Image: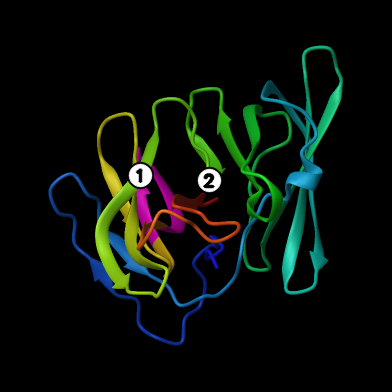
Amino acid sequence: MRAVVWILLVGCSSHPPVTTAAAGDLVATTSSDIDGFASFPFQHLDDPALKGKVADLTSEVDGDHNRWTLAVEDNANLRHTYSIELPSKVVFAIATGSNVLVEPELVGGGPNARGHIAVSDDHGAVLLAIGKLPVGWSAGPGSAVATTPGSTYDEHMFAVRVTEPGGTAVELVPAWRSFTLAGAKFVGNGNAGKRELHDERPPPDYVGAWTDFTIVRAP
């Protein structure tokens, strides 16, 4: 089963954070042991990509996480809403009246269907990204993490390398990391995988490869 990517803002930790120094084109990262998940439920996908002003941003407790509702008004004063699930300690900070570009999408199908979303400001700066990044940014498999042999396929896991338009990058793993990229502070995590079949007949709902990640801009 694929791991679900999630994101949260750094808070109090029971263990001292560990900082990994910058290397080459990779920025430094600091670990965090706070747990939580993030997702963009595709059932709540309202409209295709659009530019507009933030009309409202609210949150409500929903079990062990918060459900954030982002309302954006387009040039015709029509309101579009987007529902985003974040851990209870996450603060999704966008000022009312800000100009934003919201890019939602549905990928995959059946049990593998997933909602992705990127929210950026009018200068292209990332505010939130779940599985999708704005133009100029990119994400893909990074350093190898582990290989798990199986009876049907072998699974290879990788970090996720997120690269900003200037070419600097960060590597994300399932454990939360805080970092500075493109002049802004973020936290994020991710996982990428590739499966090698032992024969040519994949099992039902087989996924051959994926790159999952989430980053959020710190307020």
For residue 209, side relative to residue 66 (left or right): left
- Determine if the magenta segment contains residue 179: yes
- The mark that comes first in sequence, 1 or 2, is 2
The quarter of the displayed image where residue 135 is located: top left
Residue 160 lies, with reference to residue 51, above or below; the image says below
Residue 177 lies, with reference to residue 69, above or below; the image says below
Q: Position of residue 14 (x, y in %)?
A: 46, 87
Residue 88 lies, with reference to residue 69, above or below; the image says below
Q: Residues within 10 Å of mark 1 (few under 14, many from 20)?
A: some
The range drawn in magenta is 178-191
Return the mark for residue 131.
Answer: 2
Residue 162 lies, with reference to residue 64, above or below; the image says above
Q: Residue at x 55, y 41 (%)?
A: 127
**Location of the N terminus (image quadrant):** bottom right
Return the mark for residue 140.
Answer: 1
CA distance for labels 1 and 2: 11 Å
For residue 152, side relative to residue 214 (left or right): left
Give the residue type that dot 2 points to: Gly
Closer to us: 146 or 203: 203
Q: Position of residue 205 (x, y in %)?
A: 60, 56
- Determine if the magenta segment contains residue 44: no
